[in-house]
Image: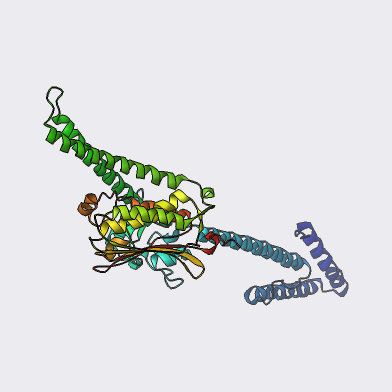
Amino acid sequence: MYRVVNKQALVKRLFIYFLPLLLIGVLVGAPFLLLFLGSFSLLIWHYHQLYRLSDWLLNQRSFNPPEGEGAWEQVFEGIYHLQHRNRKKRNELADLIRRFRDGAEAVPDAVVVLQNDLSIVWCNQLALKVLGLQWPTDHGQRLDNLIREPKFAKYMHKGEFDDALELDNGHAVEQVLEFRVMPYASTQLMVVVRDVTRLKQLEQMRKDFVANVSHELRTPLTVVSGYLEMMDGDMMPPPAMWGKAQKTMLEQCKRMDSLVSQLLSLSRIEGARRQDNDKAINVPKLLGYIQTEAQSINQDKGHELVFDIDATLDIKGSEDELRSAFSNLVFNAIHYTKAGGKVQVCWQHKGDRACFSVTDNGDGIAPEHINRLTERFYRVDKARSRTTGGSGLGLAITKHVLTRHDSKLNIRSEIGKGSCFSFDFSIDKIVPLAK
């Protein structure tokens, strides 16, 4: 254990050192000479120990200080314990910094620490990916010089960080980033960057949904209410006019009822549990019913309908949901293909997967519309969709059904040549053939 230097012990050592010299000096008749020589020797010894200490502090070839003698033993030992405590504190601080950095790397947002002059002190790995920074090349660089966006520079220099800043990311396609800045320590700022692209898309989809459903319901309600206002209790319209009005009102009421039913169906599919999707389904039989319905719908169109069905291929899932997915694609192809066209429906094995596809030779779909086809109420041609009775919910329902069955809707289309809507199921969804 470290021993503290005691003043009394030092005085005692000096007394024991000089007393013999004084006695010998008195005996030989030169006490002052011997005291001078003793003091000079003691001074040289102390300078020697001081040199050893200075040499060790400057060069420090080893962590342990040199062995001391006398009073210097406590000095060297004290320095050793002080250095040991400092090294322990440095290790604790390094461990704390390492845990802080590990925590910052685990944050699902990009984090950048800046000085007040906006120079970069540190950033996590996600910041390198999201903001396009390079580490350690960009250490000490000003962030407003690396993100060359006037709106960002103005926001940072203004210094009012109560509200977040949203910017389109120049390093990614159609990505929106949200910047939040918080004072960090006394001279630093912490910038947290979050990808809010999905939130923006959902917000836009919500606005589109509210606007579209309001429009869809308003049209039939306007027609029905307009005819009802024309009808007076004392004076009914002529039979010919009443027949036309009644037919129009019934059509609009059916359209509104279908719209509400599809909305309820979509809501039910989104909220249903996946445990309902493990029943064996006779898909060829199901497609046979759909083929009969398709032929009935096709009477006015006169398309060539071709059904290529593997009679032995069954899968596990929810029959009602998959019926909606299959029928939506088949009926859409019939509705949106010009009269006299060709619609091919295929349900076959492809490798170890069960594949369903509907191919038509219609007008095709432009590339900019394909990614949005599964959004609720989205239509390529709104006027044409209403004349065919479409609600804009069929593909949205199909998308959710397939998601619940671990599948995905694939769309290939070329203007003037037609479209192909397809999806497949993995081998674990296929019902094994009975032996």
Q: How many marks?
A: 0
Residue 152, percent across and down?
31, 59
Side of 160 relative to 137 (left or right): left
Q: Is 423 situated left or right of 151 in this image?
A: right
Say whether residue 189 is left or right of residue 222: right
Q: Quadrant of residue 360?
A: bottom left
User: Is the residue 298 above or below the residue 52 in the image?
Assistant: above
Of residues 78 and 266, the one nearer the viewer is 266
* Residue at 55% in and 59% down: 431
Vertical arrangement, residue 315 with respect to residue 391, above or below = below
Question: Could you say which is closer to the camera, residue 337 or residue 73?
Answer: 337
Q: Nearer the viewer, residue 295 or 140?
A: 295
Q: Is residue 138 above or below residue 378?
A: below
The image position of residue 197, as x and y in percent, is 36, 57
Note whether residue 326 is visible.
Answer: yes
Q: Residue at x 11, y 25 (%)?
A: 235
On the image, the x and y values in percent for residue 103 come to: 54, 58
Pick the quarter of the image with the C terminus: bottom right
